[in-house]
Amino acid sequence: MAGLGHAQTVVLSLLDGLDVCHRTVVADNFFTSISLAERMLEHDTYLIGTLRSNRAGSGSEQQNLRRGEAYGLGNKDGIKLIVHMKKTFALV
């Protein structure tokens, strides 16, 4: 899996043999990335997780959100990003 980061390599190796099964993978913020979500969607597998705001493609420009507010973003590839303000800024 040349060209992939360590976190993506770990997730994809765990899923080896399980692709094209319409599965949903839940991951913490160490493993979650936009590029991993795109790669998994190519194999009909979904990714749910918290995204670190400093990850590439996170769209993490903080909006003027108040506590309890949220907004959503999406791209043409089917990636959805929900930004939620609980106590601190969170990307889901």
Image: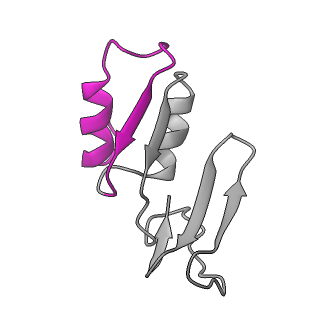
How many numbered circles are shown? 0
Q: Residue farthest to the right?
A: 76
Please tell me which residue is depicted at 63% across the width and 45% down the height of the picture. Answer: 79
Residue 18, given in percent of the width and then of the height, sits at: 36, 14
* Residue nearer the viewer, 42 or 71: 71
Please tell me which residue is depicted at 56% across the width and 61% down the height of the picture. Answer: 57
* Residue nearer the viewer, 26 or 52: 26
Residue 39, given in percent of the width and then of the height, sits at: 50, 35
Quick check: 23 left or right of 30?
right
Q: Is residue 54 magenta?
A: no
Q: Is residue 43 above or below residue 36?
A: above
Q: How is the image coloured?
A: one colour
Residue 70, given in percent of the width and then of the height, sits at: 64, 69
Residue 48, given in percent of the width and then of the height, sits at: 46, 43
The N terminus sits in image quarter: top left
Q: Residue farthest to the front?
A: 68
Q: Quadrant of residue 15?
A: top left
Q: Is residue 27 above or below residue 44?
A: below
Please tell me which residue is depicted at 43% across the width and 60% down the height of the picture. Answer: 51
Q: Is residue 32 above or below residue 69?
A: above
Q: Quadrant of residue 59?
A: bottom right
> What segment carries the magenta color?
1-29
Task: Determine if residue 33 is in view.
Answer: yes
* Residue nearer the viewer, 25 or 67: 67
Task: Determine if residue 1 is in view.
Answer: no
Q: Is residue 2 magenta?
A: yes
Please tell me which residue is depicted at 66% across the width and 87% down the height of the picture. Answer: 64
